[in-house]
Amino acid sequence: MTDGAGDGNMDGPGGGVAVEPLGDWRRTHLLGDLSAELDGEEVVVGGWIHETRNLGGLCFVVLRDRSGRVQVTLVKRKDGPLFSRLASLSRESVVMVCGVVQASEKAGMGFEIRPSGVKVLSVAEAPLPLGVADVVGADMDTRLDNRFLDLRKPEVSAIFKIRSTILEGVRDALRREGFVEVHTPKIVATATEGGTSLFPMKYFDRPAFLNQSPQLYKQILMASGLDRVMEIGPAFRAEEHDTSRHLNEFTSIDIEMSFADEEDAMGMLEKAIEGAREMVWRENQKELDLLGISLPEQKPPYPRITYDECVEMVSSRGLDMEWGEDLSMEATRIVAEEMEGFYFITRWPTEEKPFYAMPFEDRPEVCRAFDLNYREKEVTSGAQRIHDPVLLEKRIRDQGLDPRGFEFYLRAFRYGVPPHAGWGLGAERITMIFTQADNIRECVLFPRDRHRLVP
Ligand code: AMO
């Protein structure tokens, strides 16, 4: 490996500092893997210049990568050109450093790197639109406009590391239960969750929409014999909401399972969430510590309360509520005060839920639908579905929809389909709970909301 200082230079954009090609330099370690135990070992590391303290004869450069930070110590008298090259670089420039790990009681971490070579790979312009090392928080819009910089803060990227583990934990739990991961179309001709919240688009010369949910497709797959399917994918809702809980594009974790009712689906949801919780607990202690939080301790089974009981509870607290209407924010808050953490609300009014929810045989005004809430936040809805094509077509009509638009879906129920149930869990909503984020935008890299289409 050649010493990068001074060879193959090209003038960079940042104040005439030369940048160099990567060449044959490769990292031997991530910064977080270094320790005083490697005393005397030669290493090659790469990262961003987090901060520089130049004391004249001595310069401390703190390098940062995804795993941590390390101090590189330069001595002017000994390091000559290396010193001037590294000490003068702007914050957030990207460098590789080759050097020796030196145990040192004076260094904050008990060791430092004494460099023998440096490669400047990219020079950051100054001033930065968003400070990375600053303790003072920027407003949400500035952060999202400069998300790539925002994510360099470990407490911001921690959320996405946890989100990644949540998805892995859910996937792992479901695969163990025999679920097949599928991908259904996002460009569709029909509404599933109600016609008002669709984003229209043009599909060549035909009108089409961005899908609100894989609902119809995952149900069609129950007629395919795949038996248990799961999908993690985007869902689009043209809702005008401008809240801390709603996005216009979110990631939906969906399942559908055959020969099952809503109770089976609820049990599977408990397994999925518990699988995610255990995996985050095992793999993300560092991120949880960074965020200064601990995971919810509640284990399944989660308590269940019926819609009827909710109405009773809410009315007994003096809030006016008609049987049949959705739970208002205020009503949900009252219920959440009684129920801790995760809880299911079951047996919803049939008219309150989508056409595909299965009504109870002996009380058809109530259906086999459920929500899972965490405190006052809804995280999942699900149901046992209607699998009788005649009843299904009637329910589509009852809800003012045109069955002709659903012909491709109804067909799947005419040639043998088992009873089935499933749910949709919002990836951002569950990430909010696990990371204690108070705004859903913290849990999505590039949010699409009422105002935000870029970046
Ligand atoms: P629902 O419309 O309740 O049900 O959505 C399921 C879950 O998706 C999440 N979610 C959202 N997250 C962020 N922003 C939004 N605008 C948003 N809308 C929904 C929530 C919600 O609980 N087909 C059914 C599911 C099923 O029955 O299988 C459905 O889509 O966490």
Image (cartoon, rainbow, N blue to C red):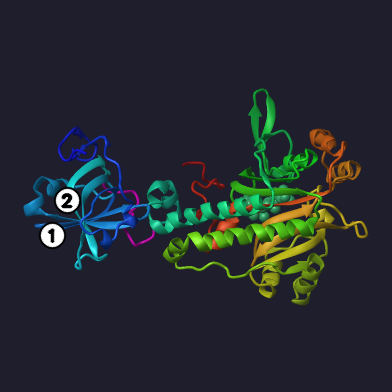
Q: What stretch is highlighted in magenta?
A: 126-137
Residue sitting at 10 percent across and 50 percent down? 79
Q: Name the residue furthest left.
A: 77
**Residue at disc 2, CB closer than 8 Å to ligand 1:** no
Q: Is mark 2 on a helix, strand or loop?
A: helix
Pick the residue in front: 317 or 350.
350
Q: Is mark 1 on a helix, strand or loop?
A: loop
Badge number at residue 360: none
Dot 1 corresponds to which residue? 55
Q: Name the residue furthest top.
A: 205
Badge number at residue 87: 2
Locate residue 397, reporting x and y percent.
86, 42
Locate residue 20, reporting x and y percent.
23, 36
Was residue 131 drawn as part of the magenta stretch in this picture? yes
Task: Check whether the beta carbons of the residues at disc 2 and disc 1 lie within 8 A of each other.
Answer: no
Query: Picture quarter containing residue 374?
Result: bottom right
Locate residue 293, reporting x and y percent.
48, 68
Q: In this view, does 53 lie to the left or right of 252?
A: left
